Amino acid sequence: FAGNLRGMIRLQSDHDLFYRQSNKLLSLVRSLHPLPAEHQKLVAEVVMIRLFMLLETVAESICCKLCCGATYLDGTPSLIVRQRSVARALDSMETFRRLKPRRARWNDGAGIRENLSELVDEKDHCIQVFLNYASLITEMRYVRNRVAHGSASARANFRKVVLKYYGG
């Protein structure tokens, strides 16, 4: 997601994109029952990777737009420092008032909060939503990492998720 934002900045397109794409993935999952179990597992893994990529993409887009002055439907602003472009917003997330530059992260609630610190009020609704769902986002990341990487640490983290939901 890059570019210069001019005129009215809207969050609705991100909302619509997320729901449209996630509903397609949900529809695909609902249609898996005729497939053999091993094929269901493979398709479900691809769905999880796609869903997590969608979450990261939309989180980045929304946060950049907030930094560039987007408001919520009720018109409330939440900015501390307004950015002129998405590129500047991303750069500021990594460098603004930081002793050492950091890489912006979009795959956990605390990382998203840290991206926006110094730019958006910490009590902002968006930040609070990401923090409220931080454990779910972390679990999704663990599953995605297990599917995509399969390292020893990814397997250990995946095991935590499986034990939480299925016991053991």
Image (cartoon, grey):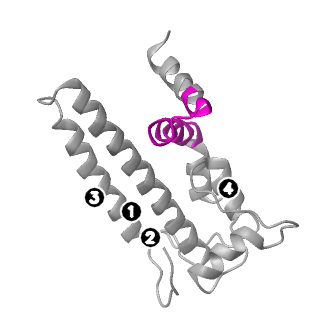
> Which residue range is magenta in the image?
134-155
* Tags 2 and 4 touching, CB below 8 Å: no
Q: Is residue 145 magenta?
A: yes
Residue indicated by mark 3: 20
**Label 4 close to label 3 by CB (< 8 Å):** no
Alpha carbon of mark 1 to alpha carbon of mark 4: how far? Answer: 19 Å
The location of residue 155, given as percent across then percent down, is 54, 28
In this view, 9 is above or below 42: below
Residue topped by disc 2: 11
Q: Are marks 3 and 2 in contact (CB under 8 Å)?
A: no
Q: Earlier in the sequence, mark 4 or mark 3?
A: 3
**Residue to which mark 1 is pinned:** 15
3 vs 2, front mark: 3
Label 1 vs label 3: CA separation? 9 Å
Name the amino acid type tagged 2. Leu
Disc 4 residue crowd, few under 14, some 14–19, many 20+, Cα 10 Å: many
Do residues under tags 2 and 1 come within 8 Å of each other at their CB atoms? yes
